[in-house]
Amino acid sequence: MSTQDDAIRELLLLMPRMVGRAKRLPVPESVRSLELSPRHLSLLALLLFDGPATVNELAARLEVAPTTVSLMVGDLSRKGVLERREDEHDRRRRIVSITEAMRPEIEEWLAGSAAAWRTALAPLTAEQRRVFVDTLLAYERALDSAAR
């Protein structure tokens, strides 16, 4: 069994390789030309996997301010990636979704990464997957604290 330092060493070597490989996944030209950032990827992944949502719902899931999401949605709406429509049940609310024209390109863009995660997580139990995700979230929080 490895020590904690052995595991840390292995992860410090692994993380840059993983990021490098993820960056080499093919990006459809129509998506590449949009000059999207990692924060856009998270927003688009949420909309793709969870479906249409309000700005406030997206902000809560992304753990950012609604104004941040609103700016991203505005930017992506101008580029034809997202659309806002009136909520049929509450006309004061606006629902955000990926446009039908861009949905296939967004799905293609995220497919490689999603398939890799499915393969990696498949042998784990639900409890093990939860521990893995919780560990990555704790790592992210620790990085954020260290950067302050």
Image (tube, rainbow, N blue to C red):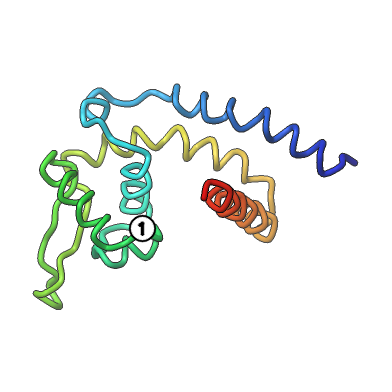
Side (left or right) of 58 relative to 125: left
> In the rendered image, which quarter contains the N terminus?
top right
Farthest residue, direction bottom:
90
What residue is drawn where x is 61% and y is 55%? 138
Task: Provide the residue designation for mark 1.
Answer: 50
What residue is drawn where x is 68% and y is 28%? 13
Q: Position of residue 124 (x, y in %)?
A: 69, 50
Q: Position of residue 106 (x, y in %)?
A: 29, 38
Side (left or right) of 117 relative to 49: right
Q: Where is residue 18 in the image (x, y as percent from the top left)?
A: 57, 30
**Image: 130 above or below 29:** below
Side (left or right) of 87 relative to 22: left
In front: 80, or 147?
147
**Image: 107 above or below 17:** below
Few, some or many residues within 10 Å of mark 1 (<14, 14–19, 20+) = few
How many discs mark residues in the rendered view? 1
Q: In which quarter of the image is residue 134?
A: bottom right
Q: Position of residue 139 (x, y in %)?
A: 61, 49
What residue is drawn where x is 36% and y is 59%? 64
In front: 106, or 34?
34
The amino acid beneath tag 1 is: Asp
Farthest residue, direction right:
1
What residue is drawn where x is 39% and y is 62%? 61
Under tag 1, what secondary structure? helix
In front: 30, or 16?
16
**Image: 105 above or below 141:** above
Q: Quadrant of residue 15?
A: top right
